Image (cartoon, rainbow, N blue to C red):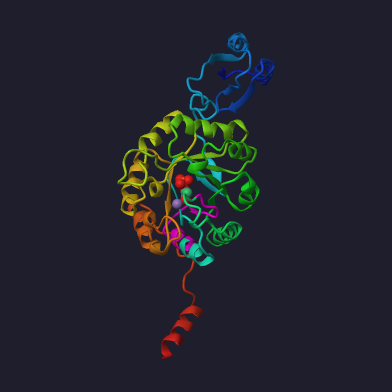
Amino acid sequence: MIVNMTNLATREEIDHVIERIRECGFQAHVIEGAERTVIGVVGSNGRRAEIEALKAAPGVAEVIQIAHPFKLVSRQLRQQRTVVDVGGQKIGDGGLIVIAGPCSVESADQLMETARAVRKAGANMLRGGAYKPRTSPYDFQGLGVEALRFLREASEETGLPIVTEVMSETDVEIVAEYADMVQVGARNMQNFSLLRRLATMRCPILLKRGPSATVKEWLLAAEYLLAGGNPNVVLCERGIKTFETATRNTLDLAAVALVKELSHLPVLADPSHGTGVRSLIGPMSKAAAAAGADGLIIEVHPCPERALSDGPQSLDLTGFALLMKDLGREPVEDLYPRTAAVSAADQLASTLT
Ligand code: PEP
Ligand code: MN
């Protein structure tokens, strides 16, 4: 249920309602809007009838039922859109942010080369997997902490905030120490103990939709994070399993538009995992933007044919720069202009045989 206070409600009236909600066995989630305060009533074991009776309390405009099982993520509770700040980069403020980088961090050089190139092409954030959820135990599993260090170095040099996946509760501390945003991968969307742990932190979370999860299950997974105290959640549609085998997954862009109706949280689209096909990344990026996505997360590798994971769905550096141009992004100024010293060294080198 939601208790909408009137725009004239006093502090005492608001505090009284919060106290009554707690007395009735619920938790109160207070949202102070510009004009009025809205109080979400959360929990399942309280005395509902007494909350309904709060209609009669001073300062209360109305008490309404929330139509969905997810409450704190619902737009019914909060009409204003959530804007998540990731290391200074805003997600959900109306712009289209682009996160780019390799599926897996493979070496310091591979990551740095990618980071410089995607930054130059206008990307807003850098991605890269340090802990990789692989279908086969014989495939590359990620470089772990070493990769986290490479990510930090690349972020420091380029200024791009980083997002990387955490796979287990054991690694939450270390990943959150290095990353600006922590990704919960598709396979872990319903790992409730991981969600509960991440809910106790303030770090922004990128919550990917499970390959077989309904929109309701996805939003309820996000509800775990908000209910546990972490409001900094960004959703990501990354394709679902359907009967179709021509693409790796089916990128459900209707779900992007639907979630924007149902929830105040920002939503990204991942056309790389969503299609598994390099040539489809461009068209689906534009389609996702048209469907209302707040951003894209795209896999980019300096040499996709040598990638240790997800090469076939990775753009190379030129392909990414072209896509960004197509999306209307201007390349940003070169962080690495050739200095006079380098040019002189090049000139000298060219005279040597
Ligand atoms: C990834 O981002 O590389 C990844 C493994 O994503 P997902 O969890 O969506 O498969
Ligand atoms: Mn991948």
Q: In which quarter of the image is residue 214?
A: top left
- Where 157 falls versus 78 (above or below)? below
| Picture quarter with the N terminus | top right
Residue at the extreme bottom: 353
Whether residue 188 is situated above or below residue 104 in the rendered picture: above
Percent position of residue 298, x then y: 42, 51
x 34%, y 40%: residue: 290
Question: For this view, does 132 lie left or right of residue 278?
Answer: right
Give the extent of the magenta segment. 115-133
Foreground pick, 252 / 297:
252
Q: Does the magenta stretch include residue 71?
A: no
Q: Quadrant of residue 4?
A: top right
Q: Where is residue 187 in the image (x, y as percent from the top left)?
A: 49, 42
Q: Look at the image and tell me in which quarter the C terminus lies.
A: bottom left
Residue 50, position in %: x, y? Answer: 62, 10
The vertical placement of 168 against 262, above or below, is below
Residue 126 forms part of the magenta stretch:
yes
Is 64 or 114 nearer to us in this picture?
114
Count up the numbered dots. 0
The residue at the point 59 percent across, 18 percent down is 8
Q: Where is residue 277 in the image (x, y as percent from the top left)?
A: 34, 51
